[in-house]
Amino acid sequence: MKAPENAAESPFHLPRLPRWRSLLRSFALAKDPLPVLNDTLAHYGDTVELYIGGVEKSILTRDPGLTQHILQKNNRNYAKSKFTRGFSRYIGHGLLTNDGPDWLRQRRLIQPGFHRQRVAALTGLMQEITSETLAPLVARAQANEGATTVEVHELMTRLTFRIIARSVFSTNFPEAELDRLARLITEIQAFFVRSIRQPYLKPWFHFRGRFKYHDALATELRELLGNLIAQRQRDNAQPHATPPDDLLQMLLDVRYEDTGEPMTPERVLDEALILLIAGHETSANALTWLTYLLAHHPQEAAAIRTDMDAVLAGRKPVFEDLPRLGRALHAVQETMRRYPPAWMVDRVALADDEYQGLHIPKGTLFSLYFHGLHHDPKYWPEPEQFRPSRFAPGQARPVQANAYIPFGGGPRLCIGMQFALTEMQLVTLELLRLFEIEWVAGQRPVTMQPLITLRPKGDFRVQLRLR
């Protein structure tokens, strides 16, 4: 990184962490990166140059202005880095890993599937699957003096996977198949992240056959979904077939404006896989953390129920009710501040750039640390406190837009944001309509596991007591 000639006058100071210090902390970073990154920023400031795993030079930042510059104001100069592109080895070249003109072409093609009207039409499906998933818990509680315990992340993963599977494929996965898909996704993620954080271990991974093993897991994952897509195409080919109105059918039906051609089978599989992975992972993790927080803050659960009583008077909500049920949405938003599912993203500069006197050469790698930004006391008073009221209208200190980015920002803002917020709000309302959420004493402290998304390390239990 070459400093600008007028560095002494520059308002932007870039401290540098020596390579040897980064290398010394690489094992701690691989084991639990959040404390290492937080300590680094606490010592050096909001932006610092360091070496990932002691090898790869990167600029780590939680500066909201620099983050906005990269994601929005000059977004065309910043692409996803080789790290994110490397994940395409396992999940293909869908919207999550794609970049450049090809990504934009795909985004424009798929965007209509997530318009507000289409999400509104899925509200009933989301409620139906939520009720189906919670019904066995109601029955267990009724048979057990009105309460039952549940593993929360397992529950939320199953629930959100069912919702996205039905939304994409109009079908329920068998339980064994669903569990297998979830394990495949977790195992692939964990290995991929470790290979990034400890790049010096790659020769050892090759020697042990770990890359080959995880390639086989990815092949199994793609085969499972490919079989579903092939079955849909066979069904569509039947005489007088009426294809379902779901996201898979949208992928099969859309045509490129410039050629009039459909997506290739490989591209349909890539995009369907991304929708399935991203469409349940973010929501599952956020709902898991929200349940954890509500179990420890029953007053916030009571506030949401007060909203429900005033607006719904006992009936289930429809899509048009959701804006009037603000406390549930604020609880979701505050959870995604505390535990942003996409806790960090990377970008690389495609050409030389400048930001407030900081010279950014072509090829500079940035690590945009959303979790650090969401916990910065300069923008969030008492950042470790769970305070959904931060997001209520009329606050004396409104939320600064570019300091809150749980779904990313700029043109690459998550395509499924409206889908996810609607889903999480509906699940929260139904869960609190049916149950009181109580923490189960005697459990180990719940810690975070930052893979590609931020999930709990292991699982935890709550007691659901019938209301």
Image: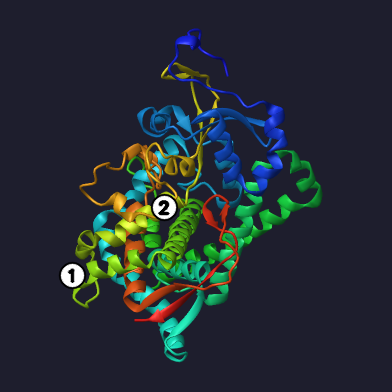
87 versus 282 height, above or below: above
Identify which amino acid the numbered label 2 is placed on.
Gln
Question: What x and y, as percent, mark residue 160?
Answer: 44, 66
Is residue 88 among the parts visible in the rendering?
yes
Question: What x and y, as percent, mark residue 346?
Answer: 52, 37
Between 427 and 213, the residue placed more toward the observer is 427
Q: Earlier in the sequence, mark 1 or mark 2?
A: 1
Residue wearing tag 1: 310
388 versus 408 height, above or below: below
Single out the residue that lies furthest toward the right. Answer: 207
Quadrant, the N terminus: top right
Q: Secondary structure at mark 1?
A: helix
389 versus 431 height, above or below: above
Quadrant, the C terminus: bottom left
Question: Residue drawn at (20%, 65%), measured in percent from left and top?
Answer: 321
Is residue 243 among the parts visible in the rendering?
no
Tell me if label 1 and label 2 are in contact, CB under 8 Å: no
Instruction: Specify whether 399 is left or right of 6.
Output: left
Residue wearing tag 2: 385
Identify which amino acid the numbered label 1 is placed on.
Ala
Question: Residue drawn at (38%, 73%), measured in percent from left and top?
Answer: 130
Q: Secondary structure at mark 2?
A: loop
Question: What x and y, as percent, mark residue 103?
Answer: 43, 41
Question: What x and y, as percent, mark residue 447?
Answer: 57, 57
Question: Which quadrant of the view contains residue 423?
Answer: bottom left
Front of the two marks 1 and 2: 2
